[in-house]
Image (spheres, rainbow, N blue to C red):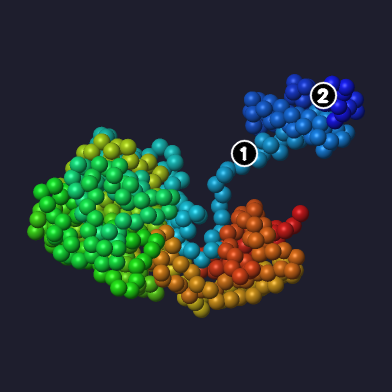
Amino acid sequence: MCNDVKGEQTVPDEINQKLRALPAVDAVMQDAAAGLLAAAHGHAATVAAVRQAIERLRSAIVAGESTGNGECDPTAIAAAARGMLENAARPNLKRVVNATGIVLHTGLGRATMPDAAREALSVAAGCCNVQMELATGKRGRREEVVRGLLQELTGAEDVLLVNNNAGATMLVLRALAQGREVIISRGELIEIGGSFRLPDIMSESGVIMREVGTTNKTHLRDYESAIGPNTGLIMKAHQSNFKIVGFTRETGIAEIAEVGRKHGIPVVDDLGCGAMVGLEQYGLPHEMTVRESLEAGSDIVLFSTDKLIGGPQGGLIAGRKALIGRIKSHPLYRVLRVCKLTLAALEATLRLFRAPDLLAKNHPVYTMLAKTPVDIEMQARELAEQVRKARPDWKVSVDKTVSYLGGGSLPAEELPSFAVSITSPKQSAEAIAKALRLAAVPVIPRVSNDAVLLDLRTVLQDEMALVVKAAKEAGQD
């Protein structure tokens, strides 16, 4: 740019000449290439992309970043618009390969749903009998799709499904204890991902939180001494993604339930991850199942459907029929109702728990948990050999590592695993990890000690080729 005598900037003649060569939007739209774009993406979207391409070229010419030679041709501008349209048409949610070693990775959508759930989603995407009894043609209840299954699997008198477990918590509190006190241990006033704080949920639910005990110890007498004429519920909450160790005491749900029965106060157990089967068979400590909590005396049990159940996101409320009836009649239930896709995927997932001995074969979450260190090492060595062939410029080895269940489940428990470790003299670990994430099918590793780690516990056998393909693409221009 130049300054005139008044100090104002003027555009050099050469740049003005290039700017005058820019075609009008209508002129570009007359080009055959633009016509093809309009047929594929729609007229309005194509016009907007062409206008944006011209404006970008105009800015580049003024900034001296473009010569304008050939770029002002309508066909060239249409080509630039095509790139914008194709980029806009790509979905934001992509399939990725979870190589983090975290089985229930919140950032990756938690559980990998089983094939049965995916097939059910494709069926439910069209018209389906979500609220119709086919035998009579009359209107039905959508919760009936999963109600019988859940009663069978948990032993609950009745169940209710909403769209997430935080919503389930709020609904139960509002329906059963609004304006009254809810007794809860101070050590269970949790905050988990996304700034979900149980005290905030209680406040928004209109209940009066009554903390008992201390952070590390809560005795049965603490619950009993807090009971008064305004007590509406006693609540127990899973500590989720943290664990207190050392000088601690936690009162069990059976003891709390006995106190509740003695005083006629409902007891709510928020299990969080919602185990349906024992985890000991997968090398993990026992996590109380939904059935066990109900058998121990809980009146209501709350749990998520996208963690240890491994289905779509949802919150389940299981327990006594009379209490479920009160909860179902609350107006907030309608606000939290799930869609047909959630019902379809959840039903298909729950059916797998009828045969718990086959979960490792049919359910990806349990396939990952069932892998032995020997299995994982063999898979890691197979992948390492393929990656070495694909990328001879990388240093590739197989190292011991540890995996985690994730999803707020058993945060202190490590699962022995093996990872393919990648380093390069030409690329930093962060650069390699980024390149893998930007592959056609992104691979999500973790970085530790300046190395990229591909933890094979969470990589399924049919994903191995995708990892090799991503390795070939990584860093390639």
Q: Is residue 221 left or right of residue 435?
A: left
| Residue 161: x %, y % from top left | 30, 47
Tell me the tag on residue 8. 2
Residue 464 visible in the picture: no
| Residue 168: x %, y % from top left | 30, 47
Tell me the tag on residue 89. 1
- Answer with mark 2 or mark 1, whichever residue precedes in sequence: 2
Q: Is residue 221 left or right of residue 23?
A: left
Q: What residue is drawn where x is 26% and y is 67%?
A: 217
Q: Dot 1: within a 10 Å radius of its alpha carbon, few (fewer than 14), some, or many (20 or more) residues?
A: few
Quick check: 191 above or below 47?
Answer: below
| Residue 336: x %, y % from top left | 33, 41
Q: What residue is drawn where x is 17% and y is 65%?
A: 220
Q: Dot 2: within a 10 Å radius of its alpha carbon, few (fewer than 14), some, or many (20 or more) residues?
A: few
Which amino acid does the dot numbered 1 rest on?
Ala
> The C terminus lies in which quarter of the figure?
bottom right
- Rendered image quadrant of residue 399: bottom right
Work out whether residue 120 or residue 143 is closer to the camera in this orientation and state it: 143
Which amino acid does the dot numbered 2 rest on?
Glu
> The N terminus lies in which quarter of the figure?
top right
Work out whether residue 264 or residue 51 is closer to the camera in this orientation and state it: 264
Q: Kindly state the secondary structure of the residue where label 1 is placed.
A: helix
Work out whether residue 30 or residue 60 is closer to the camera in this orientation and state it: 60
Q: Is residue 185 left or right of residue 72?
A: left
Quick check: 444 above or below 169?
Answer: below
* Distance from Cα at disc 2 to Cα at disc 1: 43 Å
